[in-house]
């Protein structure tokens, strides 16, 4: 099922390969590529447009926005950055909700540009690099699994030097085949432990597993520098598909409980 869902939108009618997407025209004097820093990954929906002035005249960028059919559109991010000849800067942008029914290509950055005091113009600069395609594929793998078996975290409660609760998987409508949980991975500073033996297999419409969170370290450097203290990948396989890391969905109140746990245990 996962494999079929992931392939949806990649083939044309009757299984024929989908037609290739025409390349976007280059914008004279500009070259751009996409990339992600660790801080972008921690934020979740952030990436960088690395833009270079390859021409002979300076320009100023006043806004940046992702343009891709595979992601929902978001408002442009305002940013004033001057580009002298040969200069290169990273411009932070965001991607919206993924659309797994279509390819992310062609991927471009929509920029508002001012040249030599002339009126501002909008330009569509092709984005080189695989970053947005990789993000699209990863999010669609997660979406396929969570459509087949929704994941939730319920009943989190502080108990001494731990926080306990349950991880619940609920079978989606029409989902057939096994749903198997093979691991729950820790973050840098917190370790979740499932009390049930792994791998755990969903035999009916629901799988409930008790979970206990405890600090994995109280090292001050780790506590101060970690970018993703509350990201815990749950490895879930559906049918014959490979295990996919699905981050536990934690709301603000649940993250606050875990933050309080770290403060209570590590700071006394």
Image: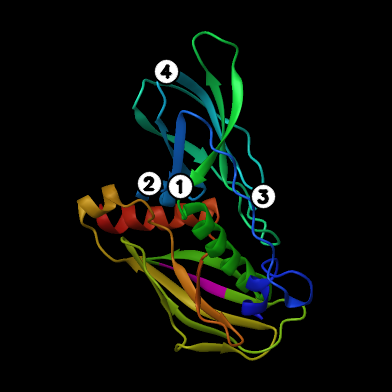
Gap in angstroms between the C-alphas marked 1 and 4: 35 Å
Find the magenta span and give its range. Answer: 163-167
In the foreground, 64 or 213: 64
Q: Image quarter for residue 8?
A: bottom right
Q: Image quarter for residue 99?
A: bottom right
Give the labeled residue for mark 3.
Answer: 69
In this rendering, the label closer to the viewer, 4 or 3: 4
Q: Secondary structure at mark 4?
A: loop
Question: In terms of sequence position, does the residue under pointer 1 or pointer 4 come before the other?
Answer: 1
Gap in angstroms between the C-alphas marked 1 and 3: 22 Å
Gap in angstroms between the C-alphas marked 2 and 3: 25 Å
Q: Position of residue 145 (x, y in %)?
A: 61, 73
Q: Main secondary structure of the magenta part?
A: strand
Q: Residue at x 55, y 81 (%)?
A: 237
Rendered view: 131 above or below 235? above
The answer to whether marks 4 and 2 mark residues whose Cβ atoms lie closer than 8 Å is: no
In the foreground, 242 or 213: 242
Gap in angstroms between the C-alphas marked 2 and 1: 6 Å
In this rendering, the label closer to the viewer, 4 or 2: 4
């Amino acid at each position: 099922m996962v494999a079929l869902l992931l392939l949806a939108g990649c083939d044309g009618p009757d299984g024929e390969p989908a037609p290739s997407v025409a390349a976007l025209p280059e914008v004279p004097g500009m070259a751009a590529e996409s990339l992600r820093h660790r801080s972008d990954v921690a934020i979740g929906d952030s990436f960088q447009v690395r833009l270079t002035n390859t021409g002979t005249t300076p320009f100023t960028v006043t806004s940046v926005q992702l343009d891709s059919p595979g992601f929902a559109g978001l408002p442009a991010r305002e940013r004033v950055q001057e580009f002298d000849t040969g200069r290169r800067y990273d411009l932070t942008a965001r991607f919206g909700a993924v659309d797994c029914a279509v390819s992310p290509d062609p991927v471009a950055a929509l920029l508002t540009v001012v040249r030599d005091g002339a009126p501002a113009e909008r330009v569509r600069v092709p984005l080189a690099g695989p970053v947005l395609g990789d993000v699209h594929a990863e999010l669609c793998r997660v979406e396929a699994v969570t459509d087949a078996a929704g994941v939730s975290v319920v009943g989190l409660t502080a108990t001494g030097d731990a926080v306990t609760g349950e991880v619940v998987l609920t079978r989606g409508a029409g989902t057939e085949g096994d749903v198997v949980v093979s691991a729950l991975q820790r973050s840098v500073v917190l370790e979740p432990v499932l009390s049930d033996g792994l791998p755990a297999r969903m035999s009916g419409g629901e799988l409930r597993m008790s979970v206990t969170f405890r600090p994995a370290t109280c090292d001050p450097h780790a506590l101060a520098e970690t970018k993703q203290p509350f990201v815990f990948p749950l490895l879930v396989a559906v049918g014959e598909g490979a295990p996919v890391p699905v981050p536990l969905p934690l709301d603000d109140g649940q993250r606050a409980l875990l933050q309080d746990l770290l403060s209570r245990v590590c700071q006394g």
